[in-house]
Amino acid sequence: MRGTSTRAGTGTRVMVAVVAGLVLAGCGGSAQPEKTAGTGDPKGNGQPGGTLAELAVPAAYDAGRGWDQELGWVEEGAESAPVAVAPGSGTVAYVIADQAEMYVQVRRATTGKVLWTSAAWTPPGSLDDSAGYDPALIAPASVTAVSAGGREYFVAWAHGLAGRDELHDGKEIVQAQVYAADASGNAVAPLRSVDVPVEADNGTAQGDAVVRDGGAGQALVSWADGYEGHAAAIDVTSGRVTTYGDEAGAVVGMSGRGPVANASGGGFGVPDGWSSTDVAPEGAAAETGGFGADQVNGTAQTVADGKVVASWEPAGEGNENGSEDTVRTVHDAATGKVLLRAECRDRTLTQIFDTDDTVLGDSVLTSVSPGGRYLSYGWMLFDLQRGSVACLAKGVGGDEGRKDMLIGSVRDDGTAYGTVAGSDPRVAVEIPASTGTPKALPAGTEVPAYTPAGAGIFLTWIEGGGILVSGRVES
């Protein structure tokens, strides 16, 4: 799951994890939240306590019941959120920093009880260490949740230089530490540590390589070399690494039969598995105009919870205002079977950058409800059980004055939370999947970045530096 962002009222800055690149978002504030017991100390007693930060939350959550965790090491404007949620076990993982050492700590989402803390981990050196070797300058670490074989794992990772010293240049890698989500105790050792070489002729910048849940028990590592994308999949149960070159296409996720990838000539599918040409939906054109030649229609946008979200250019002429409703489909990642089809206009960004710099570029958010019934992709909310779709693109349903909205998280009851794109101050919205009709929330309301059963997880900036991870129980 991923979060979206809202403009906070007084006291906080709201943070967000975005699908492509895990971009953080934020807005202005002033008050310093109180620490809870053990919030910044890996050796803390593991019990939430102290004064809760004052957060304005949706009505489904109780602002006075929950827990807070400060991550003071995260720099303002950081590009990765070191927080992840394992929905099955209802646990939240985050990365704590102590000098040059990092720790993964895991809490119960509802009660805030600390369940385990990892042994100290020193990530590889930072790529930004251009002034010379500094053993204390380490790459920023993050964490993601991956499910495999009915068990959940947390994968802590960092992108940096390994083996760099006064005599060696070092090797660029993504280092991943794999932990069982259901571990317990202190100084928990990783089940395995994996180094993935990052090969790029033109080099990469700090934060360009990211790790996310690729599906099918794989942590998917992605990075770019100019206009070419690269990927590697880490099997969390074995530690085996599989790299994918140009011949595999642009890998967007994994299935039990191999990578789900977009082909260079258009179309998508699983090599030696299934092809989009065999599952093209009604109303989609066979080909689209490419660079100098027509290409096979169909683009896989993302893979989440064993589902592929894809887009297709429609057949026929555009509508009256020159735009067309793009055909969207949700497929079973293993077989390619179409599970749901809909039409929804492409989102139109009102600005390239939000006025408060909270969304970088044309980022799109993806989230799945804990039980898997609801799936959101950017401005679309899919009910996979009913086969219905809510489209939140600009002007949908004949309301030409309505603005674009982005969905960030969705609960098991079908309630989704998001924001109006480009709004400043940020406007938070609530969307019930049953009606698809958005409702603006009161000014200053923050929306959850994650919605595990029984709680909402909110990510907010702390005045003076760092972020606050807050769990608030359902009302």
Image: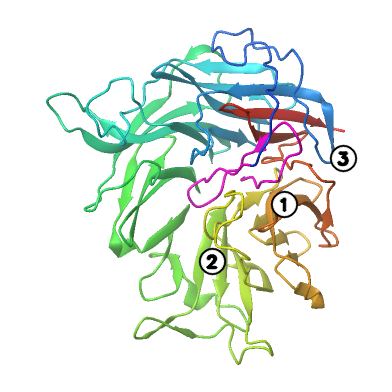
Query: Closest to the observer: 166 or 65?
Result: 166
Q: Amino acid at mark 1?
A: Gly
Give the x, y percent position of residue 274: 46, 68
User: Which residue does the numbered mark 1 point to in the structure image?
Assistant: 418
Q: Which residue is mark 2?
A: 336
Dot 3: within a 10 Å radius of its alpha carbon, few (fewer than 14), some, or many (20 or more) residues?
A: few
Above or below: residue 158 compared with residue 242: above
Q: Is residue 2 magenta?
A: yes
Q: Is residue 349 above or below residue 56?
A: below
**Location of residue 396 in the rendering, given as x and y in whole percent from the top left corner:** 76, 73
**Residue drawn where x is 78% and y is 42% of the image:** 444
Quadrant, the N terminus? top right
Quadrant containing the C terminus in the rendered view: top right
Tell me whether the residue at label 1 lies in contact with that at label 2, contact meaning CB atoms closer than 8 angstroms: no
Q: Secondary structure at mark 3?
A: loop
Q: Measured along the vertical axis of the image, is residue 80 above or below residue 185?
A: below
Of circles 2 and 3, the one toward us is: 3
Q: Which residues are magenta?
A: 1-26
Dot 1 crowding, Cα within 10 Å, few <14, some 14–19, many 20+? many
* Dot label at residue 59: 3
Who comes first in sequence, dot 2 or dot 3?
Answer: 3
* CA–CA distance in space, label 3 to label 1: 14 Å
